[in-house]
Image (spheres, rainbow, N blue to C red):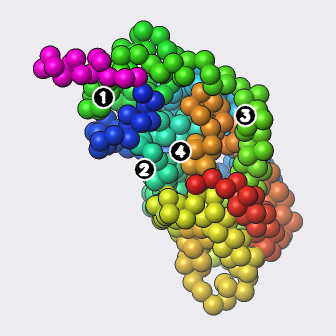
């Protein structure tokens, strides 16, 4: 026992990535990834819950489509602001504290949403939910990246990120039978309670990021890091690597636009923006577009299930194949296929099943979108990772505000589903070119 301790204490200081790459994946690492996955599932359900209940909310609170578009947009605007201005604080206070605070805020706002009776209350609470989700998404990606060996990093990020479309898929399956019984209010209250319970899970079961502890560099942080390494059956260290303390840039927008990162950062922002425009148009308006086309409310809900179900499979496939084909190259291919399918949807709809088409579109579109999470995680070093992911998601989410709002205007003007799809295929084809030029494996 003493000999083992001496080996641990005398081990050379290493970069934590190198230490995590040695040996197998521990139970603690699996736990972190699994809880992150569960949180992402809840996020997917939380954000799409308004889409599933939009028709009921519109009818019962007398809210017209243009005002529904405002509700969708303020949620996404909150996500944008949360990712840009709240998530970066995780590079200063830690991933764990930010997660606990974010999950708690989401739980409270979701519960209160189920108790609202006016448009302005909905707008306010959905904006708060958006702030919480936006601040959490970037940190889940950073935490997953920092607890996963390099070999499995893209795939583990894909697994976690696949929770978002999976949550939306499960949400549709749950909402379809329960909405007539419990109403839209019951959906939001139930989601809020489950999210609050997850706050307790995060508090007790999610440790701080090893990489973040390295950037803190204090004796207390070193003790915590050594305990975590021991729990993961990894080699310990006697000191933090010297290079980790002062040589990397501070967590700020200036660091993201430093000469070594500027070009790829701007390319990443534009790619996220274009993909968000089209994807969140579909995620927000798909059920209503289906209903307005003359089909049933249940068909509208299950159309969203097909779209998001395809996203789950596409996300996992892209994460698995990225190591062999190049991450951003594969993202480019996925976006080309998604754009082409939307562009030709009017013609394809006459020959193929609706659910099948939406499943394939979701496969390519959401698979590519989640690939951008991995891209941002790989692009930035630990010291600015949450900031980099947060700003990419945040500026990208400006597209998520634009897409649903413009879509609401088109729908109110009577534009058909097929024409809407054709219009929103164009940003995806442009995004494919941007992703290809990033050249990140």
- Residue to which mark 1 is pinned: 235
**Alpha-carbon span between mark 1 and mark 2:** 19 Å
Structural crowding at the residue carrying mark 4, measured as other residues with C-alpha within 10 Å and reported as few (<14), some (14–19) or many (≥20): many
Q: Residue furthest left?
A: 1
Circles 4 and 3 in contact, beta carbons < 8 Å: no
- Between discs 4 and 3, the one toward the N terminus: 4
- Between discs 3 and 2, the one toward the N terminus: 2
Relative horizontal placement of residue 379, taking residue 437 as reference (left or right): left
**Alpha-carbon span between mark 3 and mark 2:** 25 Å
- Asked which secondary structure carries label 1, the reply is loop
- Between discs 1 and 4, the one toward the N terminus: 4
Structural crowding at the residue carrying mark 1, measured as other residues with C-alpha within 10 Å and reported as few (<14), some (14–19) or many (≥20): many
Circles 1 and 2 in contact, beta carbons < 8 Å: no
- Residue to which mark 2 is pinned: 152
- Asked which secondary structure carries label 4, the reply is helix
Foreground mark, 4 or 3, reads 3
**Alpha-carbon span between mark 1 and mark 4:** 35 Å
Q: Is residue 182 above or below residue 350?
A: above
Q: Residue 390 in the image: x percent, y percent?
A: 65, 36
The residue range painted magenta reads 1-13
- Between discs 1 and 2, the one toward the N terminus: 2
User: Number of numbered discs present?
Assistant: 4
Q: Nearer the viewer, residue 418 or 86?
A: 86
**Alpha-carbon span between mark 4 and mark 3:** 27 Å
- Residue to which mark 3 is pinned: 256
Q: Nearer the viewer, residue 12 or 363?
A: 12
Q: Say which mark, if any, is on residue 43.
A: 4
């Amino acid at each position: 026992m003493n000999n083992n301790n001496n080996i641990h204490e005398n081990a050379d200081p290493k970069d934590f990535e190198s230490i995590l790459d040695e040996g197998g994946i521990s139970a603690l690492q699996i736990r972190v990834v699994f809880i992150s996955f569960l949180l992402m599932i809840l996020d997917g359900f939380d954000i799409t819950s308004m889409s599933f209940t939009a028709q009921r909310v519109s009818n019962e609170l007398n809210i017209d489509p243009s005002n529904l578009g405002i509700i969708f947009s303020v949620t996404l605007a909150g996500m944008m602001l949360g990712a840009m201005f709240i998530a970066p604080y995780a590079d200063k206070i830690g991933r764990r504290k930010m997660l606990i605070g974010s999950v708690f805020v989401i739980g409270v706002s979701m519960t209160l949403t189920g108790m609202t009776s006016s448009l302005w209350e909905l707008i306010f609470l959905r904006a708060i939910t958006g702030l919480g989700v936006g601040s959490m998404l970037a940190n889940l990606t950073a935490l997953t990246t920092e607890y996963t060996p390099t070999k499995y990093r893209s795939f583990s990020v894909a697994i976690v990120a696949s929770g978002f479309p999976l949550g939306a898929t499960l949400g549709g399956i749950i909402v379809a039978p329960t909405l007539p019984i419990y109403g839209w209010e019951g959906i939001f209250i139930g989601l809020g309670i489950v999210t609050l319970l997850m706050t307790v899970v995060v508090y007790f079961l999610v440790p701080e990021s090893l990489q973040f502890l390295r950037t803190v560099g204090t004796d207390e942080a070193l003790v915590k890091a050594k305990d975590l390494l021991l729990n993961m059956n990894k080699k310990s260290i006697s000191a933090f690597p010297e290079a980790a303390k002062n040589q990397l840039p501070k967590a700020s927008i200036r660091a993201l636009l430093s000469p070594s990162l500027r070009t790829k950062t701007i390319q990443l922002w534009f790619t996220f923006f274009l993909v968000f425009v089209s994807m969140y148009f579909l995620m927000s308006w798909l059920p209503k577009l289906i209903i307005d086309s003359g089909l049933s409310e249940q068909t509208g809900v299950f159309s969203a299930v097909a779209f998001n179900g395809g996203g789950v499979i596409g996300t996992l496939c892209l994460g698995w194949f990225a190591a062999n084909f190049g991450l951003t190259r594969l993202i480019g291919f996925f976006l080309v296929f998604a754009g082409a399918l939307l562009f030709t949807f009017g013609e394809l709809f006459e020959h193929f099943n609706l659910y099948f088409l939406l499943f394939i579109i979701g496969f390519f579109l959401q698979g590519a979108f989640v690939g951008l999470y991995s891209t941002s995680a790989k692009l930035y070093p630990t010291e600015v990772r949450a900031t980099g992911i947060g700003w990419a998601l945040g500026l990208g989410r400006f597209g998520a505000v634009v897409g649903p709002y413009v879509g609401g205007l088109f729908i109110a003007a009577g534009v058909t589903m097929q024409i809407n799809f054709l219009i929103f295929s164009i940003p995806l084809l442009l995004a494919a070119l941007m992703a290809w030029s990033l050249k990140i494996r």
